[in-house]
Image (cartoon, grey):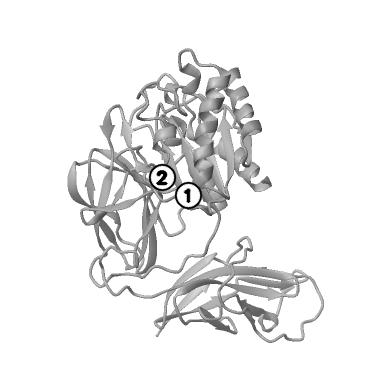
Amino acid sequence: MKKILIVLVLVTAFALSGCGQEQATPPVDVPDGEYSVRLAQESVDLLAGEEDAYIEVAEFTKDGEFADPAYLQYSVSDPDVVSVENGNLKALSAGETSVRVFCKDASDEITVRVWERAASAEISEDTVRTYGRTYEQDGGIVVDNVNSGIGFAFYGTQCKIQIYSSAAQYIRYYIDDDKEGIRVPVSRLGLHTYSFADGLEEGIHRIRVMKATEQNMWGTNFSFRVIGIETGQECSLLSRLPEEEGLKIDFYGDSITAGQGNLAESPAESITVANSDGTQTYAAFTAEALGSESSFIGYGGITVKAPKYYGTDITMYSIWHWYSTLNRQEYPVDPDTDFVVINLGTNDAGVENYDVDTFAQDYLSMLNEMSAAYPKAKFVLCYGMMGTTFFIELGIRQVIEEFSGEAYYCKLPVNVLGAGSHPTVEGHRAAAETLIQFIREL
């Protein structure tokens, strides 16, 4: 059985509840004083029955001086996943839990994930988690929408993924606890194998592969299908861990939500596939910060209901309940969704012969249909990132007054410094800060 040494540094304390009864070490006779505990990493991954870990304390003090480690106590939120004795973690069964290291009022925590090797290397719901409105087709998982994709865990040093791409586009992938991700082109039409990780330290690694390019730009459809996963010699896929229910938010919007032009450095630049990234938007940042399970529908040029660029065929009123415009089947939205965030109005402001009452009626009709599918959701109606038009803002307020459900107006800060006067990534981050606080208050 392999022993892993974990050096611990300061992290922000947080709690994860497990399915078992919390288990703590027996209390010891601890002298009074002011204690401080610092831990080194916020998480560790282990294989059930194959790996254990020793938690070493980097700093434990009493009144600013070195303290006796015997005073430390440990508690496990789910003892079915791991046990702990004198700082020794023993991996028991698949799951995720937290271990608290404490003395008096001082404490810190580490998240422990225990994995099991998958019975098969095939892509299945037992090994791969999907994000957003993905679907199965032709032996693979299809990803059409921005900030949607797949995630999985593997044991080894490298990872390659077989992807069929409909056109040259961009994706962003995240390994382990990386929050920024690495943006790479999927530049060839057809089926190819792409390397997403190589030369990693041998062990357990987690990866997410997310779509950065929206489903349609300038008449070209952008989609990719994940066909297979290769983890190299003496490597293996791991079974998915059980997932706890958390916050659920669905996002709907136009080119802003799609991330058009957000990587550009000047509003004079034209919007292109290369300078647009749907993983770097206010919606993506909000979902990440709140830890929400989310789906994202972002479609450039779209209105609420009024015909404009695409006639009546492609308005949010017509597409919100589809998997995507490339798969127009009914998507089974989760009726327990907590929030629905809608960011529309910028394109509606340019509709000919449109007025506040007509806009409000269109918006209200869409909201009424959505509320039937989202009976428990609070609706957050956003606007303002590319400036405001008086009758659009007035119409949104009118919708909120007339809507029978819960709806709120969240005005987002302006940023028109990206391509085509769209918000930059910095503008999206600022808008996310506003929206995150707004949702937390609700």
Circles 2, 1 touching at the beta carbon (< 8 Å): yes
Disc 1 residue type? Ser
The spot of residue 428 in percent (x, y) is 52, 35
| 218 is higher (above) or lower (below) than 82 | above
The spot of residue 160 in percent (x, y) is 26, 58
31 vs 371, nearest the viewer: 371
Q: Quadrant of the N terminus?
A: bottom left
Disc number for residue 294 = 1
Q: Residue furthest top?
A: 353
Residue 389 visible in the displayed image: no
At 35% from the left and 41% from the top, the residue drawn is 324
Instruction: Identify the residue under disc 2.
Output: 147
| 154 is higher (above) or lower (below) than 358 | below
Report helix, strand or loop for mark 2.
loop
At 37% from the left and 31% from the top, the residue drawn is 275
Disc 2 residue type? Asn
The spot of residue 157 in percent (x, y) is 31, 65
115 vs 13, nearest the viewer: 115
